[in-house]
Image (tube, rainbow, N blue to C red):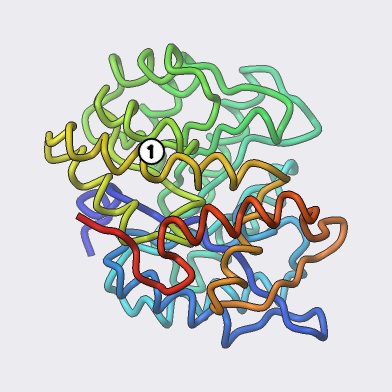
Amino acid sequence: MNLMENLKGIGTALVTPFGDDGRVDEAGLLRLVDFQLEAGIDMLVPCGTTGEGATLEPDEWDRVIGRVVEAAAGRVPVVAGAGSNSTAGAIRLTRRAGQLGADAVLSVGPYYNKPNQAGFYEHFRAIAEASDIPVVLYNVPGRTGSNILAETTLALAELPGIVGIKEASGSLDQVMAILRLRPEGFRVLSGVDEHTLAMIALGADGVISVASNEAPGMFGDMVRLAIGGNLARARELHYRLLPLMNANMADTNPIPVKSVLAMMGLIGERYRLPLVGPSPATRQRLAAVAEELGLLQHKEHRV
C-alpha cells in the first residue's frame, strides 16, 4: 500500500465497544469495521479519543489494533492512536503499533504537561526518529490544554517520518497558515467534523471523523464530492449532516456517538468510567437526529 496515496479522504475515528462485563467487545468492533468498509471508508483510526484509548489497558490496546488490522486486510490504511504525554511512552506505543501491523500512528500533543512549542517539536521529533512507522500529528487543544502552532507544525512537517496532521484547533486561520506553506505531500486532515467542508475547500485532504461511525456512506459522499470540486452537492450533504455533527458534541465525545450506534444495533451502549451515558434530553435529541437521517434503518439518504 502506498500510504501517502491512501492517507486522504475520510477516516473514521472508531469507537471501542464494550460488553456487559466491561471488556472490549470484539464482535461489536468487527461489526463496526465491516459497516465502515462496506460504506467505502478510506481509513480506519482505532484507539484515539473517540475510541477511549486513554482507558484501554495495554493488552486491550494491542487487541483492538490487531483486530482492526486483521479486518482491514490491507484494503485501507489503519492509523493507530498511539499518543502519550510521556515521550518515552509515546515511542513505546508507536513502535508497538508498527509491530501490530498499523500503517501509521496518530500522535496527540502531550496533554496535561502543556509543553511550549520547542517541547512539542522535540517530543514529535523523538517519536519520528525512534520508529519507521509514519506519524500523523494530532492537534486538539480542547482536550490537551495547549495548541501546536502552525509554525511548529510546518517545522515538524520537514522531518522524515512526519506525514500529516489531524487539525482540531478549531481555527481556520491556523489551518490556512499550514496549508499555505506545507511541504508537498504533507497531509492536512480535519479533526472537527463541522469544519471538514470548509477545510477541503481551502485545500485540506480529508477528515478523521466522529460522525462517520454513524453515517460513513453519507459523510464519505460529502468528502469525495468536496475533494472532487463539486462543492454545491457537498454543501447539501454538509447541511444535512450538520444536526448529527452538532448532536455528537452535545456531551463529551464519544458518549453521543456510542449512544446512536447502540440505537442502530451495531454495538451495546457501554462506556468506561469516568464516562457515563447521556442525559435523557440528549438521548432524545440524538434519537430524533438519527431517525431524520435514516440511520436507525441503516438507510442513509445518500446522493
Q: Which residue is mark 1?
A: 189
Image quarter in which the N terminus is found: bottom left
Q: Position of residue 170 (x, y in %)?
A: 53, 24
- The residue tagged with tag 1: helix, strand or loop? strand
Horizontal side, residue 261 vs residue 301: left or right:
right
Image label count: 1
Where residue 116 sits, quadrant-wise, is: top right
Q: Residue furthest right?
A: 274
Q: Quadrant of the C terminus?
A: bottom left
Q: Nearer the viewer, residue 162 or 221?
A: 221
Q: Is residue 172 left or right of residue 301?
A: right
Determine the residue positioned at 30% across, 34% down.
Answer: 186
Res. 272 image quadrant: bottom right
Q: Position of residue 138 (x, y in %)?
A: 53, 38
Q: Residue at x 65, y 28 (%)?
A: 141
- Type of the residue with mark 1: Leu
Front-most of residues 164 and 228: 228
Q: Is residue 156 above or below residue 47?
A: above
Is residue 162 positioned above or below 4 on the image?
above
Indicate the quadrant where residue 127 lies.
Answer: top right
196 or 167: nearer the eye? 196
Taking the image as shown, residue 9 lies to the left or right of residue 108, namely left
- In the displayed structure, 267 sits above or below 44; it is below
Above or below: residue 153 compared with residue 11: above
Mark 1 is surrounded, within 10 Å at the Cα level, by few (under 14), some (14 to 19) or many (20 or more) other residues, namely: many
The x, y position of residue 152, in whole percent, is: 50, 19
Q: Write the residue at 21% across / 58% down.
A: 2
